[in-house]
Image: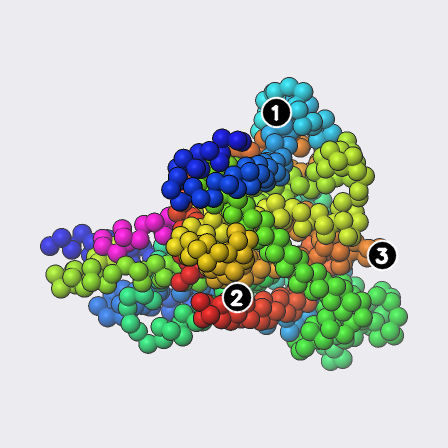
Amino acid sequence: MSRSPWLILKWVLVALTLVLLAGGAAKFAAAGEGIAVIGIAFLAMCVLLIYGSRRMIPMKYLFPGLVFLVFLQIFPIVLTVMTSFTNYGDGHTGTKDESIKYLVAQTVQEVEGAPRYALSVGVKEGADVTTAAPVFLLTDPTSKKSFVGDKDGLTELKDDEITKTDTGKITAAKGYTILNAREINARQDLRAFAVPTDDGGGIKAIGLSEAFVGKPTLVYDKAADRLVDTKTNTRYMPQNAAWVPESGQGAALPSGWQENVGMRNYTEALTNPTLREGFLKVLVWNLIFPLITVAGTFLLGMGLALLFNDDRVKFKGLWRSLLILPYALPGFITALVWRQMFNQDKSFGLINKTFNLSIDWLGDPTWAKIAILITNLWLGFPYMFLICTGALQAIPSDVREAAKIDGASGFRTIRSIVMPLVLVAVGPLLVASYAFNFNNFTLIYLLTKGGPFEGGQTQIGSTDLLITYAYRLAIGGTTPNYGFAAAISVFIFIIVALISAQGFRSTAKLEDVN
Amino acid sequence: MTTVPATATTTAPTTRAPRRSSSDGHALGAVLRYLGIAAALIFALFPIWFIVAAAVNPAGTISTTELVPAGVSGANYEDLTAARPYWSWYKNTLIIAGFGSLAAVFLGVLAAYAFSRLRFAGRRPGLMALLLIQMFPSLLTFVALYRIFVYLGDVIPALGFNTALGLIAAYLGGAMGANVWLLKGYFDTVPKELDEAAKVDGASHARIFFTITLPLITPILVTVGMIQFIGLVNEFLLASIFLKDVDAQTLGVGLWGLLEADRNRYFGAFCVGALLASIPVVLLYLTFQKQLVGGLTSGSVK
């Protein structure tokens, strides 16, 4: 009998999940995303099947984690690998047809005497007004019909979904947030935004509350697969996923499309002389940095643990708590504080001031590396101190006693008895620490952002790790190149997997020896 | 210092008696020991002292910060809360890290229970696959995650950028893989006889799990939950990509933005914010120090 409230709770949870899924499915259906709707329906069926039946007990426990694992870890990994074979990036985000539509709409110019629409600018309800894709909410002055226009074209709005003024300007629309004048002015991208119309023209904004329908100066010649600029008579042909002038002279059009480039990103990273040199430099530093960090923090942490592993030390608990403070403080804070302390100017930088130095810590490639290693030693030694203390305490005292009876010196005992036992216990954690520091994005990004940059270029910094390098390629730079960044990510995965496999194998060996 | 060897000899008079001749060496050793500890303490604490000094420095800029502050004032706190929505950041951080770590532990413990107690086809390959997937640093999939959440946010704004829910969901992708090994190892140490006895009494698997097994593994749940919580408070990359709106940001992203705006002028304000931000994490560390050490090393031996 006591089971019935639990049973009710279970069904309430199942029902709640199904309602949430149905709500999501309705939204995707409204947005015309068929595949997503099918996916959600499949999920809902799984939920019913797994939690509705008395069988499949293991699945009942695995399913929640699996859903997140599949959608937000495995799927992104697959997507990353797939992206690495494409040129996805700035100006290469859509299909070829979308690029034609976009480019043509860009060149729209007002035809004299054409009607002007009343305009409001909005974004989808709940979306960020500063960055989300804009929509035009328009009213035709003659037919009084209202439309919503986005980058794909116009859709009619029903009168009961909107409120408008006498002039036809829409002041509220269901499902959209309307931007005010200040927000419109803050958005640079609106100047280039145009809603494509079916006849090949486009609707562009003029001022804050009017829009015009115009004709483009760029025309797509479908038979020849060329874009023709009717003003200059330049013909653009598709090449390498971009529109380049047929004559071979002049710049390509600002938007291309996404296409498969096969292994090009990978071969480029390995063969392009500047990239290869940079990549190798980054790779070498990326291998050395975690090694020195792990070795340094371990030696310091182990040494301290040995110092403390003695009953004669007073107030042990207090000293220990103080010593782990660097590890307990949030890492982003300490990285930023160390950046300030390494400032070269003595009136700003504590380290140069205290030691009366004038080292350009973060501006010189070598000193920047040293600064990072010092900071990471400070950040990491308390962790090693903690785990070594744990491992030391786990060593049975009779082992040490036995060594003492055999006449071993203190140093000899530590080297031949204590260290091997501690290493067996903390070995896997050292490998894990190496792997963590291999991708220690936060430290590098907050301390040096990968810099300093040498030789006037801004692509490859002296303290860049592969991950900060990939980040700059993908998001940080002026021309994001996601495809190339994804290829670098795959490289990192392969390297980390190899190192981890090797590391775990050798720690397994250590355990066998024991 | 000289009292140290004396106490040592009194606490263990019989075993140490024959070595009394080397008490000079002990005294020297003790001095060196304390010198080492003192040096480590100075190294560990001087940056923290610098933060404190800057936080109370009345002028608030970094150029006026001295190791011995000119005075103590709360001006920087007022500067901070006037310039930025600091307490929103604080709330966001606690919400994201709190719910994120709770959900992560829950997902992890469910899976670990299945892997430890239940027998099913694909159990071993599943565990191995989890280990392999973990090796693809989830950090590296940020471009793909960015694209997924651009798409999701377009249709369901509640899951998009600038929302705690979206960021938590993104974090949960790795929840199962990250903790399942540690938790499974701990489950394996809980005697099976307990569940079997309950089963004989007719308890359902869910009842056994929630009322018998789960309470027994509370210590490791605390450890894993804490590691998760601190990891999420410290997470910077995804948070900086997801949270562009200043009101939606976490402490890490927000305080970083503050320093980016003006490294000199806001330094004092930053330090006040940093000190306040450290309180929950430091308290957690100091409270659960023992469990943390035990959990970390026991996980490694398994």
Q: Earlier in the sequence, mark 2 or mark 1?
A: 1
Residue linked to disc 1: B56
Q: Residue B79 appears at what percent x and percent y? A: 62, 26
Magenta stretch in the rendered image: B211-224
Image quarter in which the C terminus of chain A is found: bottom left
* Up-down relation of residue B302 to residue B35 (above or below): below
Q: Is residue A334 visible?
A: yes
Q: Residue A52 appears at what percent x and percent y? A: 25, 65
Q: Residue B42 appears at what percent x and percent y? A: 61, 36
Dot 3 and dot 2 within a common chain: no
Q: Kindly identify which chain the residue marked by label 1 belongs to.
A: B
Q: Is residue A332 magenta?
A: no
Q: Residue at x 70, y 31 (%)?
A: B62
Q: Amino acid at mark 1?
A: Val
Tell me: A328 left or right of B9: right
Tell me: B192 left or right of B220: left
Q: Amino acid at mark 2?
A: Met
Q: Residue B67 appears at what percent x and percent y? A: 67, 28
Residue linked to disc 2: B135
Residue linked to disc 3: A455
Q: Residue at x 52, y 39 (%)?
A: B23
Structural crowding at the residue carrying mark 3, measured as other residues with C-alpha within 10 Å and reported as few (<14), some (14–19) or many (≥20)? few
